[in-house]
Amino acid sequence: MQPREYVSPDGLLKFLVICPDGDLTMGFDGCPWHTHGSTLADLSGLSETEATERLVTDLITSVSVITVQRIGGKITDAWISADPAGDLAGYRQYGELTETIEFRRWDGTQVEVRTDHAS
């Protein structure tokens, strides 16, 4: 698979699909979170390419919810969330004083996430 780069319409996020040494890897540029085609294939039962295409399509068509973490106003991580309520609960329990978390879609639409977990 050829390396690909996707930039969100508001320019805030860049999502990369790369294949160093045959290892299909994808994630947001400058952020530690990433995933691998083999992981997606194992979870979905699809081939690595099909599972990657599904993830990318869901991302860029704004189906997926993206969690964006900032510390001191700077993005320090972003990931495609499998559990936004769990992300919010974890932030409320472990977040730093200068840390914020937000939920959005690729097109920039903000997502309101609710959790029953006490803060």
Image: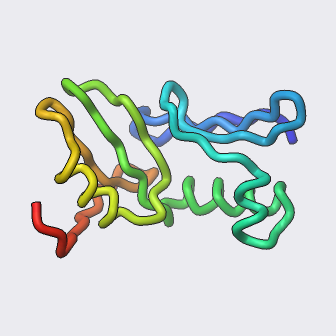
The spot of residue 62 in percent (x, y) is 48, 60
Q: Which corner quadrant of the image does residue 6 belong to?
A: top right
The residue nearer to you, when weighing 88 against 58, is: 88
User: Which residue corresponds to the image point at 82% horizontal and 38% vertical from the top-left?
Assistant: 23
Q: In percent of the image, x 54 and y 29: which residue is there?
A: 29
Q: Where is residue 57 in the image (x, y as percent from the top left)?
A: 64, 59
Q: Is residue 22 above or below residue 65?
A: above
Q: Is 23 displayed left or right of 96 in the figure?
A: right
Q: Is residue 70 above or below residue 46?
A: above
Q: Is residue 100 above or below residue 90?
A: above
Q: Quadrant of the N terminus?
A: top right
> Which residue is at the far front?
94
| Left or right of residue 88, residue 35 in this image | right
Percent x, y for residue 73? 21, 27
The mark total stands at 0
Which one is in front, 32 or 74? 32
The residue under the point 79% across, 53% down is 38
- On the picture, is 110 further left or further right than 58? left
Way the structure is coloured:
rainbow
Q: Position of residue 10 (x, y in %)?
A: 39, 38
**Image quarter for residue 45?**
bottom right
Viewer-side residue, 65 vs 36:
36
Task: Say which residue appears at 81% left-offset and 34% top-offset.
Answer: 19
Q: In this view, does 15 lie above or below 55?
A: above
> Dividing the image into 4 quarters, which one contains the C terminus?
bottom left
